[in-house]
Amino acid sequence: MNLKEILAGKGIFISAVLLLLFQCSSRRALPENEIPPKREFRGVWIASVANIDWPSRKGLPSPDQQQEFIHILDNHQRLGINAVFVQVRAASDAFYAESEEPWSEWLTGTQGRAPSPFYDPLNFMIEHAHERNMEFHAWLNLNRGTHASSTSVSPNHITRTHPHWFLNYGGYKVYNFGLPEVRSYIVSQVLNIVRNYDVDGIHFDDYFYPYPTPGQRLNDLQTFRQYGQGFSRIEDWRRNNVNILIKDISEVIRKEKPYLKFGVSPFAVWRSRDRDAGGSDTAGALSSYDDLYADSRLWAREGWIDYIVPQVYFSFGHRTVPYKPMVDWWVKNKGPHHLYIGLGSYRVGERNREWGSAAQIMDQLRVNERTESVGGSVFYSSKSLMPASHRLSDSLRGYYRYPALPPVMEWKTPDPLPRPEITEVTRSGGGQVRLRWSIPDEYEEYVRSFVIYRYLRGEKRTLEDPRNIVAIVRNKEEKVFYDLTARAESQYEYALTALDRLSNEGKPSKLHKLK
């Protein structure tokens, strides 16, 4: 995702008065009787290509890599993040052991070299994300054979063993999607991860056919002549190649593990109205349909993907792609499944009035929360949410101060869930409360986590208000929780619910009074 400045220079400032009025109206003041959202997707992309986010540099010893990743997760957990998108296949390479593709150079310094001491980074990252009740989405780049910044290519890399599968363009080697064997190979790499790792989702970014490079052409005319029967225009054929690939990936995921989530984060603009009456009012903008040959609206409308995350990395006052109208267009065109909005948090701190502070992102979050059918937000990228980054983390910590569960995907079959039984609620001398509970053995394989609700004696008891959630804890053999925030002078009542892998919630336990 290194072409995020496309069109950014076209932004203009709305008048100071209008901007002030808009910001004031968009700030969420939460009255006492307004309940914050209990279901909200709060994601962040963790980029590995060129060591953008993790690891901080090539060739770190394995313990240092692990410690860095734990530090990232701990920070994001404090901010209220409930999902991470980790780039595990950046350029036909691997951040995981179960792969025929070589180890990534951005992990070990040289492509093909294993981590030292040896470990499986993907298993490690999944385990630690799940410990913190974060969904883990394996983020794969779709089109890259080699990256322009690559310094090593191993002898068994796919660009060496199948050089005829690739097109040279803009300093990269990119897959020729017109070749059926290329599409089959990419599907096989997805299926490998799905079968071998306990990921919650598979995710692709905005790279399909490459972003346009002035003065260059894709040299796939010969492939078009061989496989383009039925298409009079090479552009339509290219789009169909990507459509086939997305549909095939969707089908193999649902066949292998129907509970897995499949999502894509395309460029913000599908198509502009000056080219298509159904497009957005973004005349002159680059579009995924015309420039990347990616019909992202079709994938959403057909339900091939479970969620779409358009990268609306633009300000409210942008001249060509203003934020709010772009979000509204996607609300109308999202199809039957989920819509989350990709936020350009990496832009905070740019030397202009719109991005000079965290206010732009915080106001975009407020718009997302108020807009029906927007299920949440995803930040690009992890680095911008770390404590040293322009105080955005401070703002998010306050905004996401109450926990949230990911939105439910009703079209996926839920697991059977038990009604937990609280077996013990006791208080220690210092006021700390210990809870123990149990569930029938036959439900153990289905329960991923428990939600612990706490109410003051006489308080309204509802499961819909996340302010009553004191913790979300992973299901382990010993089912115990220590409420360290309980006050010695307060009388509490507790209830628990069970969650499955898709965050469907079962019936609550009986209320248990603290005596």
Image: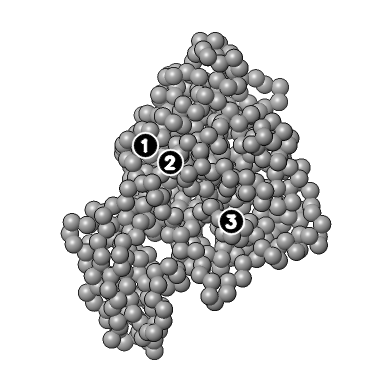
Secondary-structure class at tag 2 = strand
Residue 371's label in the rendered image is: 3
Counting labels gives: 3
Q: CA distance from mark 3 to mark 1?
A: 30 Å
Q: Is residue 267 above or below residue 388?
A: above
Secondary-structure class at tag 1 = helix
For the C terminus, the image quarter is bottom left
Residue 62's label in the rendered image is: none
Q: Is residue 372 above or below residue 285?
A: below
Evaluate if marks 1 and 2 touch, with contact meaning CB atoms under 8 Å apart.
yes
Which residue sits at x=54%, y=43%? 334
Identify which residue, 33 or 290, lies in the foreground: 33
Tag 3: residue type? Thr
Does residue 44 show up? yes
Task: Please indicate whether residue 376 sits to the left or right of residue 345 in the image.
Answer: left
Tag 2: residue type? Phe
Tag 1: residue type? Ile
Which corner quadrant of the image does residue 296 belong to? top right
Task: Please indicate whether residue 376 sits to the left or right of residue 439 in the image.
Answer: right
Read off the residue under disc 2: 262
Read off the residue under disc 1: 253
Q: Residue furthest bottom?
A: 489
First in residue order: circle 1 vs circle 2: 1
10 Å crowding of disc 1: few (<14), some (14-19), many (20+): many
Q: CA distance from mark 1 to mark 2?
A: 8 Å
Evaluate if marks 3 and 1 touch, with contact meaning CB atoms under 8 Å apart.
no
For the N terminus, the image quarter is top right
Secondary-structure class at tag 3 = loop
Q: Is residue 475 above or below residue 459?
A: above
